[in-house]
Structure formats: structure tokens, C-alpha cells
Amino acid sequence: MLTQFGATAESLSKASTMMFRIGTDAHLYDDPDDVSIAPLLDSKFESEKCEALKRLLALIAQGFDISNYFPQVVKNVATQSLEVKKLVYLYLLHYAEKRPNEALLSINYFQKDLGDPNPLVRAWALRTMAGIRLHAIASLVLVAVGKCARDPSVYVRKCAAIALPKLHDLRLEEHTAAIEEIFVEDMTMPHELITTEYMKSMIAYRLDYNLAFDNLHIFWRIYLSSSESQHIVGMLLKDNSPGVVGAAASAFASICPNNFSLIGRNYKRLCEILPDVEEWGQIVLIGILLRYAIAKHGLVRESLMLSFEDLEIQSQEKDDPESSHLTVRKPFDGASLDICTEIADIVARSYLEGPDKYLARLGHVNQDSLGFDGSCITSATSNDDVKILLQCTSPLLWSYNSAVVLAAAGVHWIMAPKEDIRKIVKPLIFLLRSSGSSKYVVLCNIQVFAKAMPSLFSPYYEDFFISSSDSYRTKTLKLEILSTIATKTSISSIFLEFQDHVRDPDRRFAADTVAAIGLCAQKLPDVSNTCLEALLYLALSESSNNAVALMGEEEILLVQVVKSIMAIIKQDPHSHERVIVHLVRSLDSMSAPAARAMVIWMLGEYCNIGVLTSKMIPTIFKYLAHRFHSESVETKLQIVNACVKVLLRAKVEDISELRLAISYVLELAKYDLNYDVRDRARVLKNFLSHCKGFNYLEEADYRTEFNDLTYVFAEYIFGGTKKVPSESFSYRFYLPGSLSQIVLHAAPGYEPLPEPCSFADDETGHSPTNVHNDHESNEIDDSDDISGSLDEENTSDYSSESVSGEGGDSYIASDSGEDEEAGTLIHLSDDAPDSGDHDRVSVKNTSSGLMDAGELMSKRALESWLNENSDSGQNSSNLSQVQRSLARISIKDIGQLVKPKSYTLLDPTNGNGLSVIYRFSSEVSKVSKELACIHVSFSNHSEEPMCNIFLAEEKPNPSPDSSEKSGSPSESVLVSHDKEATLIPMEEIDRLNPGQPADRVLQVRFEHHLLPLKLVLSCDGRKQQVKLRPDIGYFIKPLPMDIESFLKKESQLPGMFENIRRCTFSEHLNQQNDKDEPPQKDIFLMICEKLALKMLSNANLHLVSVDMPVAANLDDLSGISLRLSGEILNNSVPCLVTLTLKGTCAEPLEVSVKINCEETVFGLNLLNRIVNFLAEPPR
Amino acid sequence: MLQCIFLLSDSGEVLLEKQLTGHRVDRAICDWFWNQILTQGDSLKLVPVISSPTHYLFQVVREGITFLACTQIEMPPLMAIEFLCRVADVLSNYLDGLNEDLIKDNFVIVYELLDEMIDNGFPLTTEPNILREMIAPPNIVSKVLSVVTGNTSNVSNTLPGATASCVPWRKTDLKHATNEVYVDLVEEMDATINRDGNLVKCEIYGEVQVNSNLSGLPDLTLSFANPSVFNDVRFHPCVRLRPWELNQILSFVPPDGQFKLMSYRVKKLKSTPIYVKPQFTSDSGTCRISVLVGIRNDPGKSIDNITVEFRLPPCVTSSDLSPNYGSVNVLADKTCSWTIGRMPKDKAPSMSGTLVLETGMERLHVFPTFQVAFRIMGVALSGLKIDKLDLKNPLSRPHKGFRALTRGGEFQVRS
């Protein structure tokens, strides 16, 4: 009590100095630790505890670490006072992760609070419990969430929905331990445990959940929690209260954004409830519904996204009666229809594929049409789902929340028929008045809309007029939009505005305005004369200004003015001769070097377009020669260039007059201080004696030896009117309203729209065996037949061989893995011809079947390569040699170390004696570069022969060969109908005798989704669901490159594209003990090859280089680095891996793994995978 | 989703941090941010989305306080910005303004509010009425009480009933001794007058602000005499959209107390109530300035709170300005503000003076923009008229009141 009194007295004394702070917590913030906090926490008075906690909170606010009070604070969680509770929770949430053991003490109280009659207490307990992030209690929290999701109080249910992502996030982290264990587990597990249930759960669990599979128990727990949380999301999405639905939507978006079946079941209801959902939930829900609609129904035929296709159709069907109907719409789109469709097409592609992928593809593959067949396009008028989505989002355009408006506008932008997009314009523009911060974001989005469809915004140009209170960035955005949407009718008022802005005190902005004027003039030739007049006037007045008071700021404007004039003149130089003359005459007063340089460029370029200029030229060159020494480098270079141009174009009679001045200039330039100028002058001087016998020419070509040739080059470089290269579209478009659109790179977690019609599901979403006729599935089946026959050739030669190695036992039971070894070696020989090294092939073939020999072989190959490398230095031809031998090794090594890589697809107990095992192969598919190859081995362990074994992708409609009734039970798999990978099925096995094995190749496109692929295995007419679990290490293919390009590429991918993790590598220790090899063998080499083997056998990469420190201690391995490269299968984005070692050879090495990859998410996943298998104990 | 929210003072000091998810954000990000502000100048303060090497930052600046939120993953940026604005609104509402001291004095309340407003980076309760029920705003009584007894709790013991109702913005069982509802039309005039003195753009941004003190669950309908003047509209979530779509009637169950029912825009107005005519004449290194202010179209009510603000161009070294009415104040950053107050009846206010230009500069070639602020009570310049306000389930006949007010918004005169 005494302390409390003291504190009060003190607060009084403080209050006396500052009356207005009476009774606030000011003193606590100012001097949080002026009393001893610990005894207060132990006090029996709530008010003292409260004060102590407030002091702690003040310390947190000021950034002090006060986790040492944790034990004392935790005790107080049992309090009855809600305020103390709240403060304790605030503290707990801040520090629980640091003090997990103590935090566990509080769990009982949370459990108790969860049963409290007061919903507020329940909600708080749940929120805190989920927020303290302890792995140990994750399952408890899940139970609690499940319970609270059924709570009578809406608020508690809402908190439960929000708690789910916390759990999910915790699980993501849990993965730091190796995920691989599951597979190890899988191989050693007793057969009885491997049931369908197990298989299902194992594969149902996605790789990206990053789990630790220490044992089956944990595995089960995690599987259950994952499915359980999705189950809860599903339940909450069905909740009656809109508030809960909103929170559930956000949980859905972060837990299972692609589990469209959950949405499918509730789609209509979700649309209808949308206007009642609270604003934050609306934002997320709109996005989810949009993705669902696209995945389910595809794009809308009438929408802007398909206008390009529309146009194509239009041009193709000219004589079609319907085309007249199409052209009616043309005036609507305005005069700039052709531009806008082009951009709209890019926009659509970017939305669907992500601009990085799209732009990457632009580089090497011809632009092809979006490639939708009729089935992926739907119609807004006939499709109810699309119609209802548009209907329900349109009132949201009146929302108070700008994010909701933008999200709703995004839906209309993508899905609405072109005529209806208009609807979004006014609400979007109204957003500009809401708040300064959102204005910028909205403008960024409008800019994209306006680019793709200028006609939308052109009537509203006045709304983009610039206010002096706008920030600089807002101003530039508005300028850009204005110049995009300017039309013949509006340009006069826009131009008047621009003229005002030119006199704005902010010169940077004035310069931008000038640039905008230039753009408008280029776009609308009608006004180019007016613009030019104004610009010229400006240039003349500016240059005179400059002459008086020269400031850095002023220069920007002048340079920009000249630049804009230049751009306008370029379009039609002949009619603007007068302007050039004016500019040249004002050259004397122009002081900005860049501006001078440009004027001189124009002079040279257009020296003979009219009478006036050619008359001026000799005088001007005299002037330039006179001034040459005082010019800046930039200007000097242009003067020298202009000399050549003038000489090339001048009439013979003028030449003599010019000659003196020009040779004087060149002579000066030859002794210039700047070497660029000297070099250029020297080259010209060199040609002086050659060309046409009287003149000098040329600048940048050093190879020319013949007079005529120099002249030709000069003509080519300086002469000829070059076409201005049309602006290439380097814009990056991201989904409207996304963060990526603002920062203009794909932020982590950004996902483009789902592939149209990728989600084929009926309303129930539950019965996979349901026969459902779908266009696209049929088409896929058709293409499958073709590719299947291609595969046949690949598989045929080794399927016969593999018989020899096949044992009678099941694969799983065999511990030595000999038969697998045999299989892999055969696989090897199958691959070898590709490498084109014939002796090696023969060696390999002879060694097949002998595991040790094969292994030795691979060692030798690597060794020889390593030696070679160290001997031959950096010779590039050698390097390529290196690459080839290496690629061979990588294939072989996978063959060698395949043991952890064989997964069971179906075990004999469950498959009536049929056992199916698969492994990933490093082959690149011959059908498409996006396909990953998987080797599947079948073997019959039963007494009866089996017929018609076939493996196909699970589809609502069964594969063509199975007309029989489906026999598999339709279990409700929660993770069903996720984004499915496409599959090129294998050749059917007609008959499989008892004990007979057979191998096939499957080619699968995983789209680097780490979801298990659901397959249907039909055998003797029976069908069985199996799941194929992707391995991210095989979503890439080797990308051969040399070390220079590797380093170059690496330097281009810094910052957020780079991820590093560390792990320990201890495999070499065992190796040293096991092997009888003499210890003199280069330990460096051995470790390098061990590491390389490990990498190459677990991921489909190309080994670029192995660097060893030269002057290292014999025992010290630090500094060894391995570089590997690969590219992601489906989008060819390069992915660079660098391993750097640290430590000595006698102890476990510390390996730091670095990944540079533009696809950050993929990169992170791959990194986790690499770290996992590196840390995996040697086997 | 958001990972962390920082509140920064205008000197870059971190007032408080609230970690929202398990992915802790280090305070160092604030140092980075502030360094950027220092190196790039204040213009960065106006950029709402910044990408730092480690995080994406969203910022909203209100009265010197920077609300900074961090995220590492994709999320709608407007959601973050809108949320930060909402936090700023709620805080200034709770604390009666915003400044460094107020936040420090009430940091516990700020923490409690933030904790209720956002959970795991996703907004939880942002409706001010509900928040007020959950966490009591500081007031004199509670302050005095806390000094005397040393004991206070501003955390409510019960969950507000509204969280469960279908009108989450309203308390369920309200009792008011006086049943009254006031509707205010608050309009702001945005106008741009170009250098030739022509009206380039003139429009009204208006809000219908309602102050409702009604018992029970009242159902109101508000109709306008001339709804056709609206160019665009936005509504409070309580407004039913269907009746508006059908016959432009606002039907709603109001939250308790003051709230913005709708905002609207009326475009293409023909004239402004006042005019401002600046004039510059340069002559050999000095520049004479004269500004005239007067009434153009008498709105019928008096115009007051008139101020004219402009910023002298950087090339002006010194200025000497004198008005014939009101007072002129020149700040260090060359911002001049001329406070006129109420428009005098007998004379037109004018200001004149000389500006001395930088040496070597003959005449002024860049010209400032004048920002004009004014207020007219009792008039809605858009011409919008409220027709009637009906109460569907009246317990007793409420007292209804209507008011109108027009202010100068972005009223700019270029010279």
C-alpha cells in the first residue's frame, strides 16, 4: 500500500506542473522504471499490478527488452480484473516466443478462460493463446479454435476465424526441421501402417506446409490439424453472421487460397452476403470470389481481357454478318482502339501469368494468342455465377472504404463486359477526393486502366487536373494519365492547364509538364503545331532566363523543353524547319550542355531539310569551332558527330567552305582532355584521307579498312532517316488493387489470377468419381493420347531390361535397395546417348547391375572433371567440356543415390497385390518443357495376372479406356480439387503377370504448386485413388551456363530475390570412416564431390563451378563454394544456388545455401528443400 | 497482412510499436525510414507506399504523427492505408486531437485500442461506437478519479451487444432522454482559377453528417428535393443500397452520435462566391504584388474565416507585404498567410507589397498558387436541398434539425 501511495503522490506532483496531464498515464511513459516494478507485479492489489503492467507496456513502447519480467507477469494471467488481463495479454503476446517455457505456464488459464461465460474473456483467451506461437500447444489451440468456431457469440467466432491463420503460420515455421523424414519413415514403416488412409493423409499434406515429420504421431497430428483448419474455414464460411464470413474469408485467403471447392459450395450465398460483410472482409472476399469465378468459368468473352482475341475474330470473319455487329462497338472504344487492345492484351496476359513470366516469355518465344479454346471463355450474360458476382459487387462501388471500391472495380475491370466497365469510372475518380494517401494508390491503378482503355477516362479529364497541394508523385501520375487520355476535344483545355503548370515554382514538375506536352503533341498531330509554338517560346524565354541566373533547377526545364521539341520534330522534320532555325539561333544563350547537345544533334540530323538550314550551316560551324574549347564533353561529342553528318549531306559546293571549320574542330578534339572526344576525333581523322577523296567520315567503327566501306558505314550510321523505334511495352501490370502494382514488382505472395477453368468441379465438390462432361478434360485426354505414344518409345527399351533386376519382394520391404539400383542404372543407360559421349556409355552399360562399379564410375568421372578444372583454369572451351561431363554425372548420380527418392504410390497390401513406386527423373520431357518426368514402376505381387493397368489424372469424367463402373469409394478428402497438375499419361500396361515388373514414364506439369497430384489407377477395371507427391527439386531443369554468366545473373538478383539459410553437412565424416581409401586422397575433392552428388541427386540442377580457396589450410574447408544453376520448368526463370562451406574436415561442415531466384516463393521453397536434404543424415 | 504498426513523432522518435504477428519487425526499420525522410526531404512523407530493403511500408501522416505499418507479403495497399486512417481517426477522437504528448499520456489506451482494432494483421473491430463501449475514452471524471483513488479501469467488462446484432454499428439498447436527430450538409468547394482568371474547374465535395441521439432501433429515411445534382456518392455502411438504386432515398438505421452518412460530389458549378485577383509586375530585380479579394456572387449569407495562403517562389529573397484589412504572416519557409476573417461590408480587402528577387534576376518567371479558405454558414452552395427526414418506428416524435455549411476546399487561384 505504501508504494502505491508513493506513486500517487508522485503523479500528483507531476500533475501540478502539467495540469492537463492529470490522471493520464503520462508519468508512466516518461519514467517507467522509476519505481521497482517487480514487487508491484507480486502485489495483491489489482491497481498495483495494473500500474506495474502499464510501466512494462511503456517500456515495450519505448523499445526496451523487458522479457526478464516474464515469469512474474505470467502469474498474473489468473487475475479476475479484465484490465489486468488485457495488459498481461499484451505483454504475453509481445514476449511469449522468447520465453516458451514460462509461457506454457499460462496455458491452463487460457483453457479455463475459454470456458468463461463472458464472450469477451473467451475471445481474448483465444486470441492470446493463438498469438503466443508455441509449437508445443499448436494442437491445443486447434482444438480451442474448433470449439470457438461453434461458439454462440459472433465475436468469438470471428476471433476463431482470425486465429486460424496464426496457426497456419506457426505450422509454416515448424518445417525448419526436415520434411524428408516422412519419406524415410515411409520406407521403413511396417506394412500394416501404410494404409490408404495413411497415403491419403501423407499426400494430402502439402509440401509447402513445411512440416517436421519426426514420427508418425507428429505427422498425424499435423495432417489432422491442417485438414481440421480447412474444415473450420469451410464451416465459418457458412456462418450466418456476415461478420464471421468476412473473417473466415481472410482465413481462407491465407490458409488455402486455392481450395476452390470450399468456395464452390457456398458461392451463391457468399455473393449475396457480400454487401453485408464488414468492409475489411469484403476486400478479401471480393478477391476470392473473382479467383473462383475465373478458375471455374474462365474469362468473359465480352470483357476487356479478351478484346484482342475479339479483334482477331473480327478480322478473320470480315464477311460474317455478325462482324457488322462487332464494328458497331468500335466507336465506343474511341479512336485509339488499336492501341488499347494491344495493351489490354498485355494486361490480360499479365494478370493471368504474372508479368515477370510474361515478359520473360516475350524474349524468346513468339507472341501467341492467349490460347483459350472456347471452353475457357464464358459469357457475362449467360453465366449466372459471373452475373451474380458483377451484380453483388456493383453496389460496393459506393462504399466508404476506398479499398473496397478498388477491389470491386477490379472485378468489373476483369469480368464485366466492356460496355459496363464505365460503371467503375466515377467511383474511382471519387476516391481521389477521399484522402491524400489513398489518392496516390488509386491513381496508380487508374493509370493502368487508362492506358488500356483511354476512352474510359477521357470525358473526365478535368478530374485529373493538378492541384498545387498534390504531392510530386501524384502530380506526375496525373500528368501521365492526362497525356494518355487526351483527345482532340479535350486537348485544348488540357494544354491550357499545362501552360499554367510550366510556370509552377517546382521546376521539376514544370519539366514533367513539358514532357507531357511533348507526349500529347506526338499523340495528337493536330495540336503538335500549337504545342511546338508554345515550347519554342518557352525554350527561347527559358534560355534567356538561364543566361541571367543559372540554377541547377532551371536547367532541367530547358533540357526537357528541347527534348520534347526534338521528339515532336522527329515525327515530321520537314515542316518544322523554322523551329530548328530558331533553336539554333538561340544556341548562344543556351547554357545547359544537354540542351545544347540536343540542338546540335538536330542541326546535324536535319542539316539539309530546307534552304534556311543549309544556308546557316557554315556560319554555325564557325561559331561552334570558336566555342568548341569551352563546351562540355556531351556537347563536344555531338559537335563532332554533326560534322560528319553535315559533310555527308552537304552539297559539293558548300564543302570547301565547311572544311576549314570542321578540320579545325577535329584538330581541337584530337587534343581534348577527354579521351572519348579524342578517340572519336581520331577515328574521324583517320578517315579524313579516305572517303570520297576529300573528306573524313565515320566515328564508331573500328573494323573498316576500305574507303568505300567506311563511307557505307558512315552512311549507315549517320545518314538515312531512321525510323523512330516504336515504344516497346515494358510496363508491368499486376492485378488492380495489389501491392505489386504500386511497387511494380511481384511482392512475395503475389499470385496472378488462377488459370481459367482450372477448377472443374460440380456444385457438390465432393464426389470425384462423378461423371462430369467437360470440354477441356476431353481435350486434354486427346492430347494425352498423342503424347502417350511418344512416351512409349522412351519407355520401351528399359522396361524389358528392368525385368532382370526385379525381385519378388515388395519394394518397400527391401532394405538394401539393390533392385532399385539396377533399375536406376538402366535408366542411366537410357539417358546416356543424349550426352553424346560414347565410351562412357559403354562403360556404364557394362557396369550396369554392379552397384559398386557404377558408383566408382561416377566418382571417377567427377574426379576427373575436378582435376581437369583445376588444371585448365578458366578456359571457356574447357568449361563447356566440364559442363557436358558434369551433366552426365548428374544423371548418373541420381541413378546412384535414388534410395530416398523412390516413393510408394500404391503398396501391394492395399492394391490387391499391385505395387507401384515412383521416382523423379532428371530427364527433360520431350513433349513440353514444362513437364516433369516421373518414372513409375509397377510390379505384381499377387498370384493372378493383372490387366489394363493405367494411371491417369483424376477427373470428374473417367479416362476413356475405363467404361466400367468406378469402384473406388468416394471419400471426402478435404484437400480435394485443389489446383490440379496436368498430366500426360503413360502407356497402358495390358497385362502384368505375377512377379513381373513394368516401368513407365509419366509426364506431369506441376505448375510448381506443391500440392499432391491425385491420380486414378485403374487395374482390372478397378479404380483406386492414389496421390503423387511433387518434389520441388524436380520442378527445375539444369540451366547450363558458365561461371561469368552465373555471376552476372546473380548480381542481377539481389535483395529480396536472394535468400540464405544455413545448415550442417556431416556426410563426409561417415565417408571418411567407411572408405578404405587412402587418407591422402584429396579431402577437398572428396567433400566437394560428396556435396555435389548430394545436390545433384536431390535436385535437377546443373553444376556450374566448384571454387576452392587457393591458400587454404590443409584441414580448413572454409571458402569452398559450389555453384549450381537451374531454371524453373514452367516459366524458365533462372534459379541460382550457391553453397559455401565453412569449417574443417574433421567436424560437421557449416554450409550456407544461397538462392537467387526471381520467383521468391519458389526460391524459398527450394531453399528449404535443399537445406533439408543436405542436413539429412547420410544413409 | 500487416506485421507491425509504429507511431512516430514528427522528430522521428518511435512513440510506440505494436507487433501484430509472429514475424517480429525490428525497430531498425524506423531508423531506415527516418533516414530516408531526412535524405529525400519531406516529399517522401507524402508517399504512402514505400518499399524498404526488408519490408513494404505504408504511412499515413496526421498532425505530425506518422502511422507506419509494415508488411512483407502481398496485400491490398489501400486496405492498409484505409486502416491506418481509421486508427488515426479513432485516436484523435479518443484523445481529442493528436500530438506526441497526447499519445504518450494515453499510451495504454492506444495499446488497448490497437489490440482491439487489429488482430494478426487483419482489422477486427474498427467501428468507433463499438470501440467506445469496449474501451472507455479518457475523460475528466475518470482522470480525477484515478488521481484520487489510484484505481481505474477503462476496459469494459462486457462484450458490446452490437457485435452480435445485424447492425454492428449501433448499440442495441439505447435510451436517450431527448430524442433528437440533426442533419448537417457540410460542403467544400474545390475550384481552380487559372492564370487568365478563368474558372477551370469548380465543384462541391459534400458530406451529409448526422448526429443522432435516438432511443431504440430507429429506422430513418432521408430524401432530397433534387437528388439529380449528385455526380457521385459514397455511403456509410448503414445505408441500404437498394432504395437508393430504385428511387434515390437514403434508408438507414443510424449509429449513435455523430457520423458521416454519405459523401457526394457535385460537378461543373458555374461560379464561386468570392474572387481573388493576384497581380505581379516585375521590374529590375523587384516585383510588385497586389492581391484583391471580393465577393463575386453574394451567397446571401456572410462569408467569414477567409484566409489567403501562398508560398513565395524560391527566387524571392525578401518580401514586404501590407494589407488594408486583416493581417499578413510570413513564415520561415516563405509561406505567406493573409488572414482576413469576415468579409468587410464597406471595402474590398487588398494586400500589396514588394518582393525582392535574387541578385541577377530581372523578373519573376515562376508564380505561386494562392489557396483560399472561407466559410459560409447556412448555405449549401451545391444547391442541394433536403426534402424530408422520416422516422419509421418512432417511440416519441424526435426533434429534427437541419443545417448547412460551405467551406473552401481546394480553392486555388493561380497567378
Image (cartoon, coloured by chain):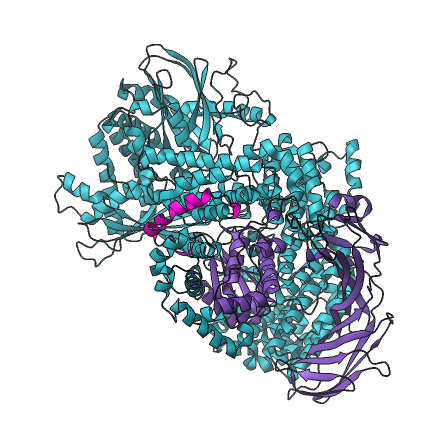
Q: Position of residue A825 (x, y in %)?
A: 28, 29
Asked if the magenta segment contains residue A105, the reply would be yes
Look at the magenta stretch and give its main secondary structure.
helix
Which quadrant of the figure contains the N terminus of chain A?
Answer: bottom left
Q: Quadrant of residue A321?
A: top right
Asked if the magenta segment contains residue A668, the reply would be no
Q: Position of residue A975 (x, y in %)?
A: 48, 32
Q: Position of residue A440 (x, y in %)?
A: 63, 60
Q: Quadrant of residue B347?
A: bottom right
Magenta range is A94-120
Q: Residue at x 53, y 42 (%)?
A: A157
**Colour of chain B as rendered:** purple
Viewer-nearest residue: A646 or B68? B68
Q: Residue at x 18, y 48 (%)?
A: A1083
Whether residue B116 is visible here, answered yes or no, is: yes
Whether residue A1134 is visible here, answered yes or no, is: no
